Image: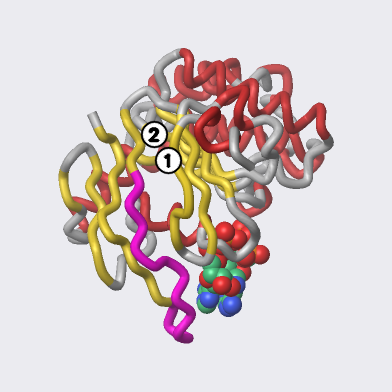
Amino acid sequence: MNIIETRDLHFQYPDGTKALNGINFIAKKGEMVALLGPNGAGKSTLFLHFNGILKPTKGEILIKGKSIKYNSKDLIEVRKTVGIVFQNPDDQLFAPTVKQDVAFGPLNLGLDEGEVERRVKESLKAVGMEAFENKPPHHLSGGQKKRVAIAGILAMEPDVIVLDEPTAGLDPIGASQIMKLLYELNKKGMTIIVSTHDVDLVPIYADRVYVMSKGQIIKSGTPKEVFEDV
Ligand code: ADP
Ligand code: ADP
């Protein structure tokens, strides 16, 4: 099943910048998909379309086979299905403790306390941050903040997690730890879409790769297909 599909997606920012110029992208259930491309290629802009934050100028997005209609009912459903981890964890972490931060999303869903507690524990465990639950997030290292931001999205129990440059700003060990964590989540059944500059890590972990440049997909396929002639 295609969890996310875009058809001939175009997007122009209000200042006239044409950030997406006909994107056809598919993520299937259970896949780990990597999106590569230089700064300014349009990766973040594409991701912001995946959960309805941005609305295409032209083309459409299908979530689980259904075209997003941009009414509030659709958007709530889409945001439950697709969770986005933004590039800068400081945009996402603002509660006094790690635990409260991760609880924020599930509480917003209106879940009862017991269920929120269960999800927070499970998500922090999945990212290996249980020991930090009472610490203030802004005192953590970059890699740890990234893990907490990921836990916050996991706690929403989405079908897909989309991560914008999750290894940016991390040292090589931290970066490979994050990719490994994503790989483990993927093995447990989570669909993962990740943009990254870490070309070395992608062939190891991704099922499929898209390469973007200037708002277009210039290459796609298995890591082997995409990398063998570069
Ligand atoms: P990437 O994530 O690959 O670095 P972006 O999606 O951030 O690429 O940017 C794609 C293009 O859109 C770039 O030319 C960028 O400068 C432009 N852009 C991004 N955000 C905005 C914005 N809010 N307003 C106008 N142009 C933008
Ligand atoms: P990324 O590589 O993740 O897209 P950027 O540094 O390109 O990060 O963008 C950081 C922020 O600046 C984003 O919120 C983006 O929307 C905004 N931005 C990027 N390019 C422009 C632009 N040309 N005009 C206005 N805002 C922009």
The answer to whether any part of residue 26 appears in the image is yes
Tell which of 229 and 76 is nearer to you: 229
Q: Residue at x 74, y 32 (%)?
A: 175
Tell which of 113 and 171 is nearer to you: 171
Question: Does residue 171 lie above or below 218 as drawn?
Answer: above
Question: Which element is circle 1 on?
Answer: strand
| Quadrant (top left/top right/bottom left/bottom right) for the N terminus | top left
| Quadrant (top left/top right/bottom left/bottom right) for the C terminus | top right
Q: Residue at x 32, y 52 (%)?
A: 24
Query: What is the span of residues highlighted in magenta in the rendered image?
Result: 13-25
| Disc on the earlier residue, 1 or 2 | 1
| Left or right: where 123 falls relative to 21 | right
Q: Main secondary structure of the magenta part?
A: strand
Q: Are marks 1 and 2 in contact (CB under 8 Å)?
A: yes
Tell which of 73 and 214 is nearer to you: 214
Residue assigned mark 1? 83
Question: Which element is circle 2 on?
Answer: strand
Q: Splitting the image into 4 quarters, where does residue 10 fall? A: bottom left
Residue 224, given in percent of the width and then of the height, sits at 54, 28
For label 1, the crowd category at 10 Å Cα-Cα, with few meaning under 14, some 14 to 19 and many 20 or more, is: many
Ligand 2, by image quadrant, is bottom right
The amino acid sitting under disc 1 is Gly
Residue 55, given in percent of the width and then of the height, sits at 31, 65
Residue assigned mark 2? 160
Residue 129, given in percent of the width and then of the height, sits at 68, 22
For label 2, the crowd category at 10 Å Cα-Cα, with few meaning under 14, some 14 to 19 and many 20 or more, is: many
Q: Residue at x 28, y 45 (%)?
A: 5
Question: Does residue 26 lie above or below 17 as drawn?
Answer: above
